[in-house]
Image (tube, helix red, strand yellow):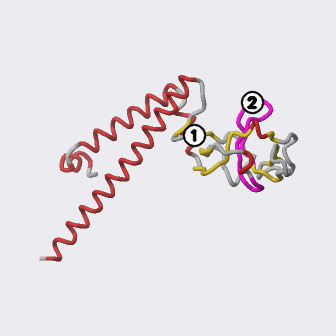
Amino acid sequence: MSGNKSPVKLKKVLNIVENTVFTIILLFIILTLFSTAYSRIKGKEPSVLGHKLYYVASGSMTPTLPVGSLVIVKEIDASGIKVSDIITFKGSSGTAVTHRVVEVPKDKKSFTTRGDANNTNDPLPVVSENLIGKVVIHIPFIGYLLQFLKSKYGLVVITAVIAFMIILNLLPKQKVNKLGGF
């Protein structure tokens, strides 16, 4: 008799884990969607929970940050930056640049940076006023999704996908099994 209860308990636990993971992913997608839409309306950079989101558009940081990566950047005071940190800053053209710090003067008012794939340091030092923050995490290829979300079509598609996922999750399990063997 106890042999029959164990698989039932395991099934319940797995179901709870599955629902929890689904909910977390769904909330993250919704949060990112609203953040991206709000940022687009306000003309600002997307952010989630105080962390800014950037898309890696060039290969200057490969292999560490492949093109299409999403980098999550936390605002940090210039005094907290050290050699080997990967930072995001406003480049000379006003666009965001993400490179590694290779030298920090004692006054910590500027930084020498270089892309991992580059043979030479960046031509101009990064002054602390242009520091956006420190990269805390990067997720390869998810930046492509962020770029897509910024488009009109991306917002429509992701909204439809989220709605479909919610509806699918709300359907009783028996009906879902009959529909397609999920």
SS type, badge 1: helix
Q: Nearer the viewer, mark 1 or mark 2?
A: 2
Residue at left 54%, top 28%? Answer: 151
Depth check: 44 or 21 in front?
44
The N terminus sits in image quarter: bottom left
Using the image, determine if residue 152 lies above or below residue 85.
Answer: above
Amino acid beneath label 1: Tyr
Report the front residue among 48 and 28.
Answer: 48
- Callout 2: few (<14), some (14-19), or many (20+) C-alpha neighbours within 10 Å? few
Q: Amino acid at mark 2?
A: Gly
For residue 94, the mark is: 2
Q: Specify the segment rendered in magenta.
A: 82-99
Using the rendered view, name the quadrant where residue 8 is placed: bottom left
Residue lying furthest bottom: 2
Q: Is residue 101 magenta?
A: no
The residue that appears at 23% across and 45% down in the rendered structure is 179
Residue depicted at x 86% and y 40%: 124
* Residue 36 pos. (x, y %): 52, 32
**33 left or right, relative to 128:** left
Callout 1 crowding tier (Cα within 10 Å): few <14, some 14–19, many ≥20: some
- On the image, which quarter does residue 51 sit in? top right
Q: Earlier in the sequence, mark 1 or mark 2?
A: 2
- Residue that numbered label 1 is attached to: 144
Element type at marker 2? Answer: loop
Q: Residue furthest left?
A: 1
Measured as percent of width and height from the top left, residue 50 is found at 55, 40
Magenta-drawn stretch contains 93:
yes
